Image: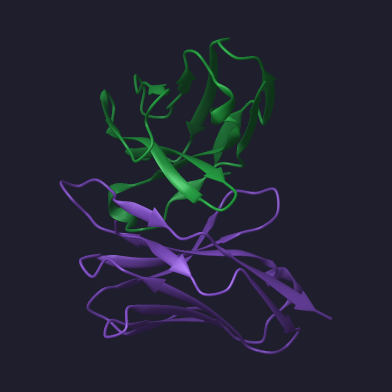
Amino acid sequence: GESVGLHLPTLSVQEGDNSIINCAYSNSASDYFIWYKQESGKGPQFIIDIRSNMDKRQGQRVTVLLNKTVKHLSLQIAATQPGDSAVYFCAENTYSGGADGLTFGKGTHLIIQP
Amino acid sequence: EAQVTQNPRYLITVTGKKLTVTCSQNMNHEYMSWYRQDPGLGLRQIYYSMNVEVTDKGDVPEGYKVSRKEKRNFPLILESPSPNQTSLYFCASRTWGGGNEQFFGPGTRLTVL
């Protein structure tokens, strides 16, 4: 079946460096791709999304890149801070009849080294 | 403060004892949903509701019920819990114009013995 997954379960980066979290997807019919952040003991928090007809979108300190040719999604976090430590999920959304068809990947744990 | 609240936050129960996890949002959102989160499986949708009195199955609805009698509340009901329903549960909501930004509650950790 269709799935959304992640290349690496854990990513360790130095504070101040840029982080790149990768995600592979298989459903080329998805309408949107989304990144969520989940801190320990909390629910997921929306970071940024990108429509399937775009290849790049920027937010505050974050950039999402979409490569439909190889079905690859990435989240870049600039100047990583201790507060960025969390599990990051990519997700895909396929709208059908107004309802969400949200499918989450399994998550990458981002660890910030001082 | 705009938020999604869930109760209880932690629950240990025994097989077969009916339970309800409540979910409430104060943002006047039309869309609400329930997810379960399990190690190695990520977040999976159980049920969702597009508005009052409108509910539908997600990816893993077996063993669960929901109701949406009021816009702000979306309780999750386990009529006869089993150990395989031990999990971390999240309620989420969003508005129709909110795109992909779902607001998640803090989670309910359920253990069924």
Chain shown green: that is B
| Residue B21 in view (yes/no) | yes
Q: Identify which residue is drawn at 59% across, 36% down.
A: B87
Relative image position of residue B82 (x, y in whole percent): 55, 21
Relative image position of residue A3 (x, y in whole percent): 36, 60
Vertical comparison of A60 with B12: above or below: below
Where, by quadrant of the figure, is residue A112 drawn?
Answer: bottom right
Vertical comparison of A110 with A14: above or below: above
Q: Residue furthest top?
A: B17
Relative image position of residue B32 (x, y in whole percent): 38, 38
Quadrant location, the N terminus of chain A: bottom left
Where, by quadrant of the figure, is residue B9 drawn?
Answer: top right
Marker count (numbered) = 0
Q: Residue furthest bottom?
A: A17
Which residue is at the front of the view, A40 or B25? A40
> Viewed as shown, does residue B93 lie left or right of A60?
left
Chain shown purple: that is A
Quadrant location, the C terminus of chain A: bottom right
Which residue is at the front of the view, B24 or B61? B61
